[in-house]
Image (spheres, grey):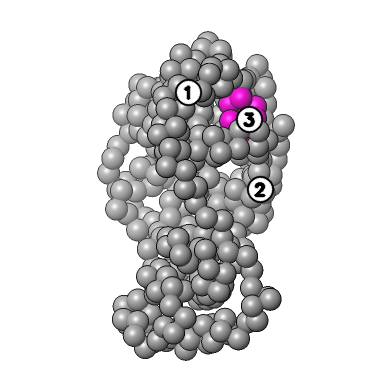
Amino acid sequence: MNMPSRDSFSSAPLLALDTEFVWNRTYYARLGLVQAAATGPFDRSRLPSAPPAAMPFRAPAADEASAILLDPDQCPSAPVRAVLEDPATTKVLHDAQQDLQHLARWTGARPVSIFDTRLAAGFCGLPSTLSLARLVEAACGISLPKTETLTDWTRRPLTPKQLEYAAQDVIYLGRAAQWLAARATELGTADWMFEEMASLDDPALYAEPPPDEAWRRLKLPGFVRADPRAMHRARELAAWRERLARDRDLPRKWVAADEAIVQAASAPSFRVDAIPRKELPPAFARGFAATLEACARTPDADLPPAAPAPERDPTLRDRASALLKKLAPLAEAAHVDPVLLATRADATAWLARPDDPANPLNRGWRRELAAPAFRRPGA
């Protein structure tokens, strides 16, 4: 477990991180800015702080003196990678996973020792969906500005106002994290909170999934999922699109729309020229057709198994709702957001396989908190 203990957290070196990016015409988000701010005994010299790697900005408040605004196009990634992979430095982010995915791709790092203030709020009697602005207001009594939300962070130069706005997202984050840790200690949820933070060290959270798994993003009809050959077409077309979108750095839908893949998977005699241009641009139609032709030549013996059919127990949805209703007051009494304790998918899976050790409800703090509900008849 890389996270510091609840007792040492207040004195640990903390580095607050955030990213600004543009993500509308590419497969990968394009980083425009990386914000960092030190709290505690973090050595600021570990990160570049001079132009062109860092962007100077006016610091109207003393708190902002610790902030560094890094330009990903000019800053070497190695120092950032070293910090991300340093287990002795706690990285504080709000809604950490997406930012860390972008940072991991830029630096090649496997981030460890993460403290997600959005998740932490859910162990402090607050919603686990709490916005950064609401958190900073609660923890620090400061209202963050809401301007510059439509900024193109990849444009240069950025204005002083834009840079000051970006710095505001990290300068109070370390203090907010310490406030949350102290509040969780008072409420008796700190051990659970730090256990949940340790799960963020999983490198799979920040790695690109293999293209062969891209079909899972599709909303496939039941009859497609039940037909091995139809599923083969769906898997192969989704993987083809994923590889091409990555190679060309294009949004998936610019290569082929989901609707085109689902339609082609559904009908073995489907004609590619029947797909509207907006769903399959002509530049990619030949590759789409070639993938379908290759699927048609695959022998039955080489087909992968059909996807598991969804649970068809007509009572399961109501039973899952009933279980969630039993779990919610247990979580609320413990000052934990019920959403963190169990999702509907967790509850449904538990009812189908109550002894599954992989189910979150059968592990760690969730098992401890949910146990009374499972001891009751009919749970």
Spatial CA span between label 1 and label 3: 13 Å
Q: Secondary structure at mark 3?
A: helix
Which numbered disc, 2 or 3, marks the residue that appears first in the sequence?
2
Q: Secondary structure at mark 2?
A: helix
Q: Residue 203: x and y, percent?
A: 66, 48
Position of 197 relative to 270 (above/below): above
Q: Which mark is residue 327?
A: 1
Residue bearing mark 2: 203
The amino acid type of the residue labelled 2 equals Pro
Q: Which mark is residue 84?
A: none
Residue at the image position 58 percent from the left and 26 percent from the top: 366
Is 235 situated left or right of 282 in this image? right
Spatial CA span between label 2 and label 3: 22 Å
* Magenta stretch: includes residue 287: no
Q: Residues within 10 Å of mark 1 (few under 14, many from 20)?
A: many
Q: Nearer the viewer, residue 47 or 111?
A: 111
Which residue occupies the extreme front position in the image? 314
Is disc 2 in contact with disc 3, using a CB cutoff of under 8 Å? no
Spatial CA span between label 2 and label 1: 30 Å
Is 161 situated left or right of 252 in this image? left
Residue bearing mark 3: 362
Q: Nearer the viewer, residue 368 or 297?
A: 297
The amino acid type of the residue labelled 3 equals Asn
Q: Nearer the viewer, mark 2 or mark 1?
A: 1
The amino acid type of the residue labelled 1 equals Leu
Residue at the image position 44 percent from the left and 84 percent from the top: 269
Q: Give the residues drawn in magenta, as a range.
A: 359-367
Q: Residues within 10 Å of mark 2 (few under 14, many from 20)?
A: some
- Kindly indicate the quadrant of the structure image that contains residue 318: top left
Res. 147 visible in picture: yes
Residue at the image position 61 percent from the left and 25 percent from the top: 367
Q: Residue 40: x and y, percent?
A: 59, 26
